[in-house]
Image (tube, grey):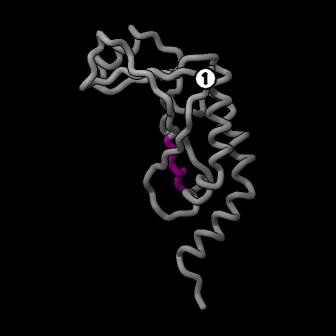
Amino acid sequence: MTPNKYEIAERKAKKIMVWCPDYIRKVFSSKRMYHHLEKHINLSEKEMKRRVAREKVDVSTFVGNESAILNLLLQTLLDSVEEIAYYLADDSKRPWEVSGILPSHIKGYCYKCTNHNWDDGPIECTEFKIVINKIKGENGFAILSCYP
């Protein structure tokens, strides 16, 4: 009997789980691998407002020790390795979001480009997202964005 697509994906995911944790540790221990993360770390309110006005996008920032933020992102990827393995085993080409809760020692703030009275200050965030995408023709993935 021929295996169905779910059985094939399950086998692929199990094989990916063998190498994926080491891949995550090796590739994502550097800030530069988190695609424009500098736009999301320790920004002032003035910088955030300026970017919202200039680019017409919602802008958010992690606030805290940079190495602690990087460690949080890396640990979240490692904690989500099974979910990531199934994503990589799947045939879809869409990006995938991994979510996490901000710990007390790292804050997150956001300025929205619509429906936000800036006079009230930034919106405090309790969660964050890491958006990943498969690398064409390779085993692995890249970070498209990560933000509170």
For the point 59% across and 54% down, the residue is 83
The x, y position of residue 144, in whole percent, is 48, 39
Q: Residue furthest bottom?
A: 1
For the point 39% across and 21% down, the residue is 123
Q: Is residue 120 above or below residue 94?
A: above
Q: Main secondary structure of the magenta part?
A: strand
- In the rendered structure, the answer to whether residue 8 lies left or right of residue 111 reads right
The x, y position of residue 142, in whole percent, is 55, 43
For the point 52% across and 54% down, the residue is 136
> Quadrant of residue 9 in the image?
bottom right
> Quadrant of residue 117 in the image?
top left
Residue 71 lies within the magenta run: no
The x, y position of residue 78, in whole percent, is 68, 44
Extent of the magenta region: 131-136
What residue sits right under mark 1 in the picture?
104
Q: Is residue 147 above or below residue 92?
A: above
As rendered, which of 39 and 75 lies closer to the eye?
75
Name which residue type carries label 1: Ser
Helix, strand or loop under label 1: loop
What quarter of the picture does the N terminus occupy? bottom right
> Quadrant of residue 138 in the image?
bottom right
The x, y position of residue 109, in whole percent, is 45, 21
- In the rendered structure, the answer to whether residue 133 lies left or right of residue 53 reads right
Q: Is residue 136 above or below residue 26?
A: below
